[in-house]
Amino acid sequence: MELAARNDANAFEVILERHSDAVFSLAYRMCGTRPLAEDVAQESLLALWRNGGRYDRARGSVRTWALGVTHNRAVDALRRVGVHERRRAREENIEEHLPAPESTDGQAIANVASEEVRVVLDKLPSEQRRVIELAYFGGFTQTEIASMLDTPLGTVKGRMRLGLEKLKVVFATGRSVHELA
Amino acid sequence: MSSRDPNLDCVQRVDAAAYALGALDEPEAYREHLATCTTCQQEVAELQAVVDTLPTTVPQARAPKALVDRVFARARAEAELLNAAGPEADRPPRRPNRWRSRPMTLAIAGAIAACAAAAAIVINSGSSSHERVISAQIATSIQGAHASLYQIDNRSNLVISGMPQPALGKIYEVWLNRGGPSPQPTDALFSVTSRGSGSVAVPEDLHGVKEVMVTSEPLGGSSRPTSPPLIRIVLPA
């Protein structure tokens, strides 16, 4: 990353090889359509190239930084689309019916840690998982989520906090979600 | 006298989860609060570590090769230009050596006002290669935007900052005006980052080109401009 930050395009090629699939996958998961996901992934990868000097190793891995940049770009893109269009897409489950891009089974299945996170997330109470997914992957604000779910804002805040707190404890202690319920 | 942290029971701690998830409606206010509240700082740090694992739950897909190739080509072009032009390359020219005033050849060019930054030309003669940076004229409808064309030999890159993102369903398109009745379209279509920065390689040799222009066009580009130019770079004869 240090070399890429000094305008070394060959070093950046290594960054692309290692992280472009993860960047595109997150963009695709959040945007739901391939053209928008490609736009977001391209912006994100170019941001890594142009802002490499801002990467701080102490604040996490390059992968974490890259996915954080991608998340921010995707949220910006989703919020430009507008809440009503996003809400309609979610309600109709458009994302789930889109043809999946070519999958990279080997790398995905081999990533046991990722699978563990997904399993833990799936075991959260559905109302907690839903607000977390709407916020993180849908780019909705807590007020928008409260409106969508016809739920008081305080309840949405509480579900977000409870859900994340449970994940934190599970990751830290290895206890199951059910033990925390 | 208690030594208890006054922030320990901070009522705003309840917003830490939404902040870490990016779901606060007004994150700036909470960010200001974080600067002084150690309890919320710790809470956000712990929850952020959890949030950072969420992308790993996403089914993995292969990034399209064309996308990766496009990004790498852009990075390589920028690296060549910036490395050749030196550390000052991505800054505005400090000593413009002349001002240009040139008749506008297109009727739609009326949308470009006699803006504050007329085209300034810098010829870098300290290198064996032919290098120059040409500042752009920006439409008055865009406040605070800057654009420059970096040329090394026959390669050119347009580097932009402070530009608003294209409207929904629109994209910026680069045009070449060779003095004909209408400008020549290119396949250089681009957007800008949320901070308004971007760059695009101008795909052709600019020999004989009088102006490089940028307009906002429908996604996929147009064969003729459908809107007035937002950026104009007048090339020296």
Image (cartoon, rainbow, N blue to C red):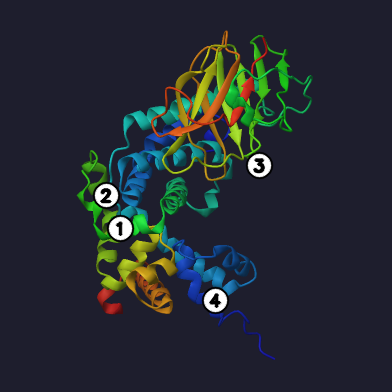
Subunit ID for the residue under disc 4: B
In the picture, which quadrant includes the C terminus of chain B?
top right
Tag of residue B7: none
Subunit ID for the residue under disc 1: A
As shown in the figure, which amino acid type bears the numbered disc 4?
A: Gln
**Residue A113 visible, this angle:** no
Q: Earlier in the sequence, mark 2 or mark 4?
A: 4
Nearer the observer, disc 4 or disc 3?
3
As shown in the figure, which amino acid type bears the numbered disc 1?
A: Arg
Tag of residue B12: 4
Residue B1 in the image, given as x and y percentages of width and height:
70, 91
- Cα–Cα gap, marks 3 and 1: 34 Å
Q: Circle 3 is placed at which residue position?
A: B143
Residue B38 in the image, given as x and y percentages of width and height:
60, 72
In the image, are marks 2 and 3 on the same chain? Answer: yes
Q: Circle 1 is placed at which residue position?
A: A88
Q: Give the residue displayed 66% in from the left and 37% down from the top.
A: B140
As shown in the figure, which amino acid type bears the numbered disc 3?
A: Gln
Helix, strand or loop at disc 3? loop
Nearer the observer, disc 2 or disc 3?
3
The reply, left or right, for residue B122 in relation to residue A16 is: right
Q: Give the residue displayed 44% in from the left and 61% down from the top.
A: B49
Tag of residue B59: 2
As shown in the figure, which amino acid type bears the numbered disc 2?
A: Pro
- Cα–Cα gap, marks 2 and 1: 23 Å
